[in-house]
Amino acid sequence: MEMKSTMSFLFLLQALINVVSAFKPPPIPPEDINVYRCRNTGNYTSTNYKNNLISALSAVAKNIGAHGGFYQSSAGTTEQVNAVALCPSYLNSFFCESCVNKSIPLLQKNCPNQKEGVTWVASCMVRYSDRKISGVLDDWVWVHLPKDPIVAKVRELDQAVSDLASRLQTQAAGGTSLKKFASGNTTYGMEKVDLYAAMQCTPDLSKEQCTKCLFSTMLTVHSCCSGKLGARMLSPNCYFRYDHDQFDNIDVLPRATSIR
């Protein structure tokens, strides 16, 4: 009788665990996977700038999830700070908001008093500046993240990446003022290997600016990442990534191996 009671208790306990697990939020990408860059154009010393920075970053964190993965904010009339956050369209609002919220403390820690900085954590980007950045094409920093190893058929992969990128560039640049994003897939080689890619610009860019930014990523991928299993090219205004695996919400950046 005691054995039966114990078994019943364990059964109920397991059922309760299953119910709780079903409502548990999905895992968040690790905080310590991040890439950042602080621009060497001067430091701030005033409390006013710091408060404006906190306000601008807080606004993008609060609003990013409800605005389709892109949000801009400005704070202050004197020593104004402008901030931007961007998430790829394949990242749902929960992960997007979580990613941005985790990015901001890391950006503040790594750029403690610089007037301009940018960070990429998992799949999202957060940046701020003391100058106008909306509608401005910036190329002051590029981050290249090749994914090892090198595949066997380098030439075939490189051609497939180039063809797919050219198609996606047109789609992304032709997007709206709310979203400039494109993703797609193809196959290459006799074995019909699957290849996936995505491109995105901050939607405040014009079509011409987005085209130019994405073209730079296409040039970069050939110089830094030929034959690599996957790669990402990141800038403050656009990015390009390809991989042999589909992209999903649990998405983590490899550590940067080449930054300029």
Image (tube, rainbow, N blue to C red):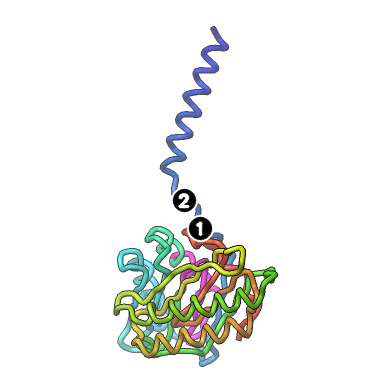
Residue 135 vertical position relative to residue 26 in the rendered view, above or below? below
Which quarter of the rendering shows the N terminus? top right
Q: Residue at x 33, y 78 (%)?
A: 175
- Find residue 260 and report its horizontal and vertical position in percent: 60, 86
Q: Please provide the residue range marked out in magenta.
A: 101-124
Q: Is residue 55 above or below residue 141?
A: above
Q: Position of residue 83 (x, y in %)?
A: 39, 79
Residue position marked by numbered label 2 in the rendering = 26
- Mark 1 to mark 2: distance in Å? 9 Å
Q: Position of residue 114 (x, y in %)?
A: 51, 85
Total number of numbered discs in the rendering: 2
Horizontal arrangement in the rendering, residue 70 relative to residue 244 (left or right): left
* Amino acid on which disc 2 is placed: Pro
Q: Sequence order check: which comes first, mark 1 or mark 2? A: 2
Between marks 1 and 2 in the image, the one whose residue lies nearer the viewer: 1
Q: Is residue 211 above or below residue 62?
A: below
Which residue, as the protein is rendered here, is positioned at the far bottom?
41
Three-letter amino acid code at the position of disc 1: Ile
Provide the secondary structure element on which disc 1 rests: loop
Q: Residue at x 35, y 86 (%)?
A: 207
| Of the pair 40 and 27, the residue shown nearer to us | 27
User: Does dot 2 land on a helix, a strand or a loop?
Assistant: loop
The dot on residue 32 is: none
- Residue 166: give x, y in percent of width and height: 47, 81
Which residue does the numbered mark 1 point to in the structure image?
Answer: 250
**What's the residue at 51%, 92% (across, down)?**
41
Q: Is residue 227 visible?
A: yes
Callout 1 touching callout 2 (CB < 8 Å): yes
Q: Dot 1: few (<14), some (14–19), or many (≥20) neighbours within 10 Å?
A: some
Residue 121 lies within the magenta run: yes
